[in-house]
Image (spheres, rainbow, N blue to C red):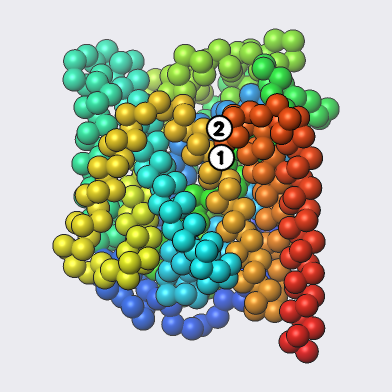
Amino acid sequence: MISFLLCLAILIVGYFVYGKIVDNTFGPDDRETPAVRINDGVDYVVMPQWKLFLVQLLNIAGLGPIFGAMQGALWGPVVFLWITFGTIFAGGVHDYFSGMMSERNDGASIAEITGKYLGPVMQNVMRVFSVVLLIMVGTVFAVGPAGLIVELCSQSGASGVLTSLLFWLIIILVYYFIATFISIDAVIGKIYPIFGICLIIMAIGVGVGTIARGYEIPEIFPLRNMHPAGTSIFPAMFISVACGACSGFHSTQSPIMARCCKSEKMSHMVFYGAMVCEGIIALVWAAASCALFPIEGGLMTGLKEAMAVGQSGCVYNICFTTMGGFGAILAMLGVIACPISSGDTAFRSARLTIADALKMDQKSYKNRLILTIPLLALGVLVSQLDYTSIWNYFASTNQILAAIVLWTAAMYLRHEGKNAYVAALPATFMSAVTLSFVFGSKLYLGGIPFLAGIATYLGVGIAAVMLIAFIATAKKGAKAAQ
């Protein structure tokens, strides 16, 4: 338990110390923000800081810090290190700069920002890439909570239509249409703060329940791989745990809140702070997953068996064990609200990304309908695919996007003459992770034996070359400026 408490303390201190370093590196000032200058009553709406923080937390949280943390716990408590240091040095940096770069560019979506600092080719790639990712996210965060609701109804003895996955999926998608289409403060700004508070209370309940009921949270050291299948820690664990450490999906959500900040000085709490809060939530779920299930032969076999039955059932099991029946219902409702509140903003962000690319004004009901209906129709089609396959592609493309956005932030900082290594170093690490995964995974290159055998060397090597090239161009740029 010492390792868990130490990591928790590091996350909190990291927000105040390294988060402030990141904030000072960017240099927020008193300039007029897009929320004030462009205010259109639909997507550009001024909100107070506390509400921005809670909405941002729900936008980025989804199932990631819960399902992802549970997946990561299969490697054992070593996952605590990635959640803790990934949040502070990569995820927090990623989320902060994606939000602040958007603020400095009239609330532009991440694809447009990428194009400005990495060129038009990358801009078009990111337009397609981010919309595809957002549709996958929206779908995952519709199917996932629908399954959780079915699980909750089944556990309570309900039958018939209430235990139908299709029924709840339709209900959720209808809600997604409403939330994607109407003004951000009409639904999202009013109910998300309540859900955000529930999400935080739920995490506290699971964490306190795990400790109070005497479950032993294993220690990180000695470092060991406890995955039952022997899957290597690098790069697989860093792909599986995304939203609780570093997630490219967040860069598609941060511009939504960037359009609602009254002052740039709110951004440390809103963007970096929400990421740290999500890291804490992921840490709690990872700790509970490591503690509550039997460990056999130094392997997380009990957790693997529980997850094989279904992740929704595993979540219910953890909630019931740590908080009892009433607490389990409250926690499950929080877990359900969490992904739904990310799914609707995923589709909303997809709408805004396409609108930015097409220069399509979103004040018009007609223009919003033209984009909203096809996006949700695609979501319905994708929802019919195998859930595990969607999640696997989502997890990997998510981290690829994170690497691209971190490089974009590094280029922005270099352009502004500031310390670019705050973003360049985590960008290099995420590039090594994603490239190693791409070369070694069957998802992308079919598991070519030759490439799979040297995937890590290729990934790390190419990432190192990217960093060297960045340093070289940065030096040339500095000399040219003198």
Q: Which residue is mark 2?
A: 443
| Residue ID at (75%, 38%) | 456
Which label number is shown at residue 166? Answer: none
Locate residue 116, reporting x and y percent: 53, 72
Say above or below: 45 vs 194.
Answer: below
Q: Are marks 2 and 1 in contact (CB under 8 Å)?
A: yes
The N terminus: image quadrant: top right
Which one is in front in this view, the residue at disc 2 or the one at disc 1? 2
| Residue ID at (67%, 44%) | 435
Q: Is residue 101 visible?
A: no
Number of dots carrying numbers: 2
Distance, label 2 to label 1, CA atoms, is 9 Å
Locate residue 152, reporting x and y percent: 33, 22
Q: Is residue 450 left or right of residue 276?
A: right
Q: Is residue 348 left or right of residue 283?
A: left
Q: Between 191 and 104, which is closer to the camera in this rendering?
A: 104
Q: Secondary structure at mark 1?
A: helix
Q: Which residue is mark 1?
A: 396
Q: Is residue 354 left or right of residue 278?
A: left
Q: Is residue 401 visible?
A: yes
Say above or below: 240 vs 57.
Answer: above
| Residue ID at (43%, 54%) | 128
Q: Amino acid at mark 2?
A: Leu
**Neighbours of disc 2 within 10 Å: few (<14), some (14-19), many (20+):** some
Locate residue 214, reporting x and y percent: 63, 20
| Residue ID at (33%, 32%) | 383
Q: Secondary structure at mark 2?
A: helix
| Precedes in sequence: disc 2 or disc 1 | 1
Q: Amino acid at mark 1?
A: Ser
